[in-house]
Amino acid sequence: MPFLGQDWRSPGWSWIKTEDGWKRCESCSQELERENNQCNINHNIILNSEDEEIFNNEECEYSSKKRKKDHFRNDTNTQSFYREKWIYVHKESTKERHGYCTLGEAFNRLDFSSAIQDIRRFNYVVKLLQLIAKSQLTSLSGVAQKNYFNILDKIVQKVLDDHHNPRLIKDLLQDLSSTLCILIRGVGKSVLVGNINIWICRLETILTWQQQLQNLQMTKQVNNGLTLSDLPLHMLNNILYRFSDGWDIITLGQVTPTLYMLSEDRQLWKKLCQYHFAEKQFCRHLILSEKGHIEWKLMYFALQKYYPTKEQYGDTLHFCRHCSILFWKDSGHPCTAADPDSCFTPVSPQHFIDLFKF
């Protein structure tokens, strides 16, 4: 039989079975009544004791708790966490699943906050944030926006602390501020989700971060042990040949005169161009010196303006073609395939964005 209470949201009354049928258990209700009566008596004592400070203090405490609760709800530093670190990617309703998966939902579930602490995933997450800033900012929900700027804040603080890859973050913030300036001007078209004042505050925060990174000073480390300058030339040369970014080569070449000499090697820049670009692209943008030699260093930066470079990441998200699940490989997912590894495909940042385009 249904146990109906006075309020449909309540758990209902307690009932016991007797020889005469079901009867309501009075013990619980009587105990609740006694507690209510006791609260009413205490409340009357407070009001009648002419000690209004006690009552006022309770009101202040209640108001303070309410303000903290509202602040927590609206605070951009609060992030939504999920136990599973994977997400099922579906673009239309099926008999088994209704609705579809959005970019904001994926951004909330895939634990990017922990990923930025892993040096293998740091560049991958930054590139992903940069692509979202360029083209997908308007598709983020309110919660996804909070998580986005929360992760961005952690990245900026991490760079300010350990001085790791400030150039990448400067580029990300520059793209984000440029996009926001354009979108805020189009507020009449309702292109942004949320209050326009919140976005203006976020833009001011971005400008503050940019100023902090601009004033970032690299402290010289005092080390009495083995340093990079103590390595033999062939080992330093091998290190330079491992770089896939021309700006990293130039930055390392500024450390010592020896590294500068190695960083200007024409063969080094030729290998870098051949790695990123095809020969047909070379022919369209040849840059020759006065002696007729190809200026590979200048060609690399010229080709970079016209063609995308290859991307290298220590670790990326993976997509399971069998389960249609997006996940970090270390975390795994509940795969039902006989040979799961054969179903996994690495997901580039651009591929991640494309998965959620409808």
Image (cartoon, rainbow, N blue to C red):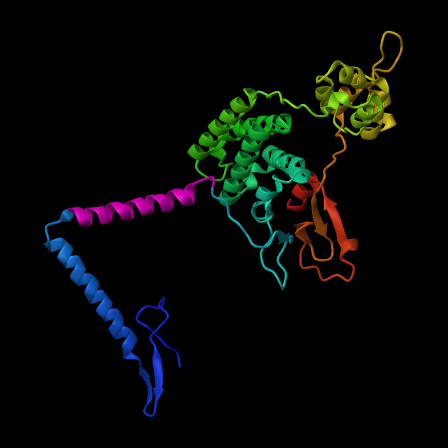
In the image, residue 155 above or below residue 31:
above
Residue at the extreme front of the image, as rendered: 224
Q: Quadrant of residue 197?
A: top left
Any magenta on residue 336? no
Q: Residue furthest right?
A: 292
| Whole-percent x, y for residue 145 in the image | 52, 40
Q: Residue furthest top?
A: 290
In the rendered structure, the answer to whether residue 29 lies left or right of residue 169 reads left
Tell me if residue 76 is in the magenta stretch.
Answer: yes
The percent coordinates of residue 116 (x first, y second) are: 61, 39
Percent x, y for residue 223? 66, 24
- Secondary structure mostly seen in the magenta stretch: helix
Coordinates of residue 59 in the picture (x, y in percent): 23, 48
Q: Tell me which corner region of the image, top left, top right, bottom left or bottom right, holds residue 119.
A: top right
Instruction: Name which residue lies at 10% across and 50% down.
Output: 50
Determine whether 147 is above or below 17 in the image. Answer: above
Task: Please name whichever residue, 256 or 323, is drawn nearer the observer in this view of the structure.
Answer: 256
Above or below, 88 relative to 200: below
Residue at 56%, 22% in the rendered image: 216
Which region is colored magenta? 53-77
State the image quarter where residue 11 is shown.
bottom left
Is residue 309 found left or right of 85 in the rendered image? right
Name the residue at 67% across, 56% down.
333
Q: How many marks?
A: 0
Q: Is residue 281 left or right of residue 175?
A: right
Q: Can residue 219 be seen here? A: yes
Q: In the rendered image of this protein, does residue 203 appear above or below residue 318?
A: above
- Measuring 51% from the left and 48% from the top, which residue is drawn there? 80
**Of 236 and 23, which appears nearest the observer?**
236
In the rendered image, which quarter contains the N terminus? bottom left
Residue 305 visible? The answer is no
Give 303 or 147, whichever is nearer the viewer. Answer: 147
